[in-house]
Image: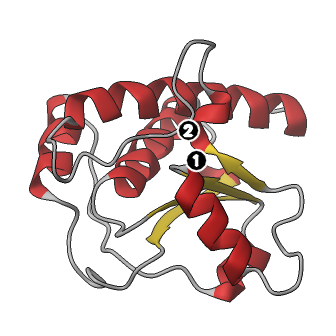
Amino acid sequence: MIKVLFICLGNICRSPMAEAVFQNLVNEAGLAGQFEIDSAGMADWHSGERADRRTLAVLKKHDIPYAGRSRQVQPADLRRFDYVLAMDSQNVADLRRLDRGDALDGKLHRLLDFAPAGHPQDVPDPYYDGRFDYVYELVDAASRGLLAHIRQEHRL
């Protein structure tokens, strides 16, 4: 089982979108049984809440289901997951601080590291500026690259 975790600040906008988009791509590739996919936030502000309505609207527009609930990342997640994908540089720094035993060695990446050349390094937080469609484009491009990377790495 290949375990993939997406991380953003509050787990209501970017990381649930990435979780849903990546899960959809995995499903379309017929690989659902080989993956465990989840998302979490660095902060606990929204724990137990549904994703932001604007995230859900963008996913619905692309016929991608999502029913997850927000949760805060736990130190155990860093050991359990094979790939930990942060949405931005601040999330990377926060995850490194949370990692007390080098659990993230070799498995922590920014999601956009898997996007085609020309994309920014960080997925911007659309919570205040409302750029959810732009975030979807970034997440979709990077998720396709991530899946290709994992398929090559695991010979799927």
Between 11 and 94, the one nearer to me in the picture: 94
Of the image marks 1 and 2, the number of the one nearer the N terminus:
2
The three-letter code of the residue at mark 2 reads: Val
Q: Which residue is mark 1?
A: 32
The three-letter code of the residue at mark 1 reads: Ala
**Mark 2 crowd level (few <14, some 14–19, many ≥20, 10 Å Cα):** some
Residue 22, given in percent of the width and then of the height, sits at 50, 41
Q: Is residue 91 above or below residue 114?
A: below
* Element assignment for label 1: helix
Q: Which circle marks residue 26 in the picture?
A: 2
* Apparent side of residue 109 relative to residue 88 in the rendered image (left or right): right
Q: Is residue 115 above or below residue 78?
A: above
Residue depicted at x 58% and y 51%: 89
**Mark 1 crowd level (few <14, some 14–19, many ≥20, 10 Å Cα):** some
Residue depicted at x 28% and y 83%: 45
Pointers 1 and 2 in contact (C-beta within 8 Å): yes
Q: Is residue 155 visible?
A: no
* Apparent side of residue 8 relative to residue 137 in the rendered image (left or right): right
* Apparent side of residue 13 relative to residue 138 in the rendered image (left or right): left
Residue 27, given in percent of the width and then of the height, sits at 50, 39
Q: Which circle marks residue 24 in the picture?
A: none
State which quarter of the image contains the C terminus: top right
